Image (cartoon, grey):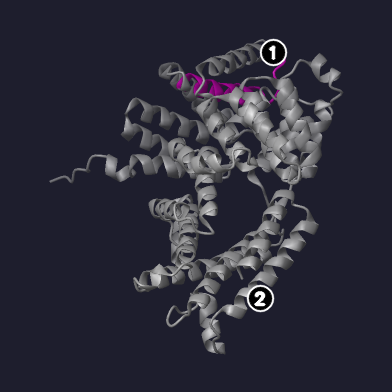
């Protein structure tokens, strides 16, 4: 059963990396066969008990050691199969995936109950460490993922039987990573992904780089030239602001293996951003172009990103490269993906911005590469480097001056001005110039009634203004402003992404009611 699970897991990872229909079919076939293999070793049950188990999971009484491991492997494979099902575009597949995830979670919960009821002498068996490590990974991963959801979604998930305790999730994954079990590397990778990507992209924190380095250290010592070790070492360097060192490690990661080209693509994505942080647009374009040519994850995002980077270059440079920026922007809409009939928010945002190029007389985006940098929360990263932040601020001030000198402003003029003010405010806040940053943010908010297209600007700016108040130590004001952004704005671009950030920010500051003084009842 472990062979079957391991083989199907590798095919699942390959399918997730390539998005190739053939790879996805091969992975799904292997996952079904793995489920069948695990099922052979599970405790046999009658019809009514089987129906009950479908909802509640296998009962934990009187299972042999082999049957316990079969439960755990079954849960692992079921979770992966459900994740792969989500990639289908139909709503039916989306529902099936959700049911599969719940079934997997309930089995993990039952395995946890088994673990808690095992006698001390049975815990000395040589296979027990692998069972305990699997429980830690499953329970930890689910709790960590669910804890990221906004509170109203989390309440629904808890009603369905899930739980989302972040500290419990981190604790379980840490135990799993330290266990030297078959799944310890998976627990380690989940923690690294959380600290180095999830927290940063969703804007829910800076990531625990100290813990990430400690987790990676033993693997770095054993596999100094391993592709994943080099990749994560480079990513830590990015989050510290050591972009040159990071670029060297990403290139070393690319050179170390050829078999999984998708790891190269991860490096291209990172290299594109590190060069963008430095405003080295030629090098950034080079890697954006490679992603457009080679990778299928999100062609709409890559096309927009490539066009956005080219927009930062002088026209003569773009001509030398043989590129047509207008044509690239016009491709974005046709490249969008649908998952369960829904658009990917980042692609939807890119397509909406690219609409300006669909008319016979395109209206240029003002600083699209810097705006996308904000979408991916890159200002929090580049903020580690005051010199580069100052350089980006200079670029924004130059663009602001050009807009001010525009003799025939378009219908997008005010929106463009507000984009610049938001990004300027971010730079100024990172540089500690809080009064000037607040002025920029308030300028955007005061323009609310006149913004025509970029409806995300005001709620996102309110959120950033709230973080500024938090930085000053005025927690009450910070919560008030962020709650305003949360409660009073709907149906804007990337709304769910902002709600993730708001949820995390309010969690660090406590509830709104807890911070306000108690109301006085008249005598």
Q: Earlier in the sequence, mark 1 or mark 2?
A: 2
- Span colored in magenta: 407-429
The kind of secondary structure element at disc 1 is loop
Q: Is residue 419 magenta?
A: yes
Can residue 344 be seen in the rendering of this structure? yes
| Residues tagged 1 and 2 counted as in contact (Cβ below 8 A) | no
Mark 1 residue crowding within 10 angstroms, few (<14) / some (14–19) / many (20+): few
Q: Is residue 37 magenta?
A: no
Instruction: Return the residue nearer the eye: 311 or 276.
Output: 276
Q: Which mark is residue 152?
A: none
Determine the residue positioned at 73% across, 67% down: 29
Instruction: Return the residue nearer the eye: 380 or 270.
Output: 270
Circle 2 is placed at which residue position?
Answer: 36
- Residue 457 image-quadrant placement: top right
Instruction: Return the residue nearer the eye: 106 or 136.
Output: 136
Circle 1 is placed at which residue position?
Answer: 406
């Amino acid at each position: 059963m472990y062979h079957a699970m391991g083989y199907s897991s590798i095919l699942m990872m390959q399918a997730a990396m390539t998005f190739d229909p053939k790879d996805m079919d091969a992975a799904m076939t292997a996952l079904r066969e793995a489920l069948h293999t695990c099922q052979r070793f599970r405790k046999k049950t009658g019809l009514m008990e089987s129906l009950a188990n479908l909802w509640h999971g296998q009962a934990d009484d009187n299972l042999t050691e082999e049957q316990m491991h079969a439960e755990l492997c079954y849960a692992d494979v079921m979770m992966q199969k459900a994740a792969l099902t989500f990639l289908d575009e139909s709503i039916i597949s989306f529902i099936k995936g959700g049911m599969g995830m719940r079934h997997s979670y309930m089995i993990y919960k039952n395995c946890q109950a088994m673990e808690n009821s095992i006698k001390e002498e049975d815990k000395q068996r040589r296979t027990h460490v692998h069972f305990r490590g699997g429980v830690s990974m499953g329970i930890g991963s689910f709790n960590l993922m669910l804890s990221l959801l906004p509170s109203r979604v989390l309440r629904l998930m808890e009603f369905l039987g899930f739980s989302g305790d972040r500290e419990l999730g981190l604790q379980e994954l840490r135990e799993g990573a330290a266990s030297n079990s078959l799944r310890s590397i998976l627990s380690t990778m989940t923690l690294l992904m959380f600290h180095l990507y999830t927290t940063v992209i969703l804007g829910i924190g800076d990531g625990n780089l100290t813990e990430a380095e400690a987790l990676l250290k033993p693997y770095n010592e054993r596999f100094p030239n391993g592709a994943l070790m080099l990749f994560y070492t480079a990513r830590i360097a990015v989050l510290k602001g050591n972009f040159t060192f990071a670029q060297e490690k990403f290139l070393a990661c690319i050179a170390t293996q050829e078999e999984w080209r998708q790891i190269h693509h991860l490096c291209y994505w990172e290299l594109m951003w590190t060069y963008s942080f430095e405003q080295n647009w030629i090098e950034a374009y080079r890697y954006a172009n490679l992603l457009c040519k080679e990778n299928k994850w999100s062609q709409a995002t890559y096309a927009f990103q490539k066009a956005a980077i080219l927009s930062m270059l002088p026209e003569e440079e773009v001509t030398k490269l043989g590129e047509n920026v207008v044509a690239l922007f016009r491709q974005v809409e046709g490249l969008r993906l649908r998952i369960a009939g829904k658009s990917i928010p980042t692609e939807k945002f890119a397509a909406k911005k690219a609409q300006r190029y669909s008319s016979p007389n395109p209206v240029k985006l003002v600083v699209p590469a810097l705006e996308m940098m904000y979408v991916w929360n890159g200002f929090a990263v580049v903020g580690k480097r005051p010199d580069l932040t100052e350089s980006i601020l200079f670029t924004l001030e130059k663009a602001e001056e050009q807009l001010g000198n525009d003799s025939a402003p378009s219908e997008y003029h005010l929106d463009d001005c507000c984009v610049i003010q938001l990004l300027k405010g971010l730079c100024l806040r990172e540089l500690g110039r809080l009064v000037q940053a607040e002025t920029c943010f308030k300028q955007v908010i005061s323009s609310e009634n006149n913004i025509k297209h970029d409806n995300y600007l005001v709620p996102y700016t309110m959120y950033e203004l709230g973080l500024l108040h938090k930085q000053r130590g005025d927690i009450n004001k910070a919560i008030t402003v962020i709650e305003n952004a949360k409660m009073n704005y709907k149906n804007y671009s990337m709304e769910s992404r902002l709600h993730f950030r708001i949820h995390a920010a309010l969690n660090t500051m406590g509830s709104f009611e807890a911070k306000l003084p108690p109301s006085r009842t008249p005598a």
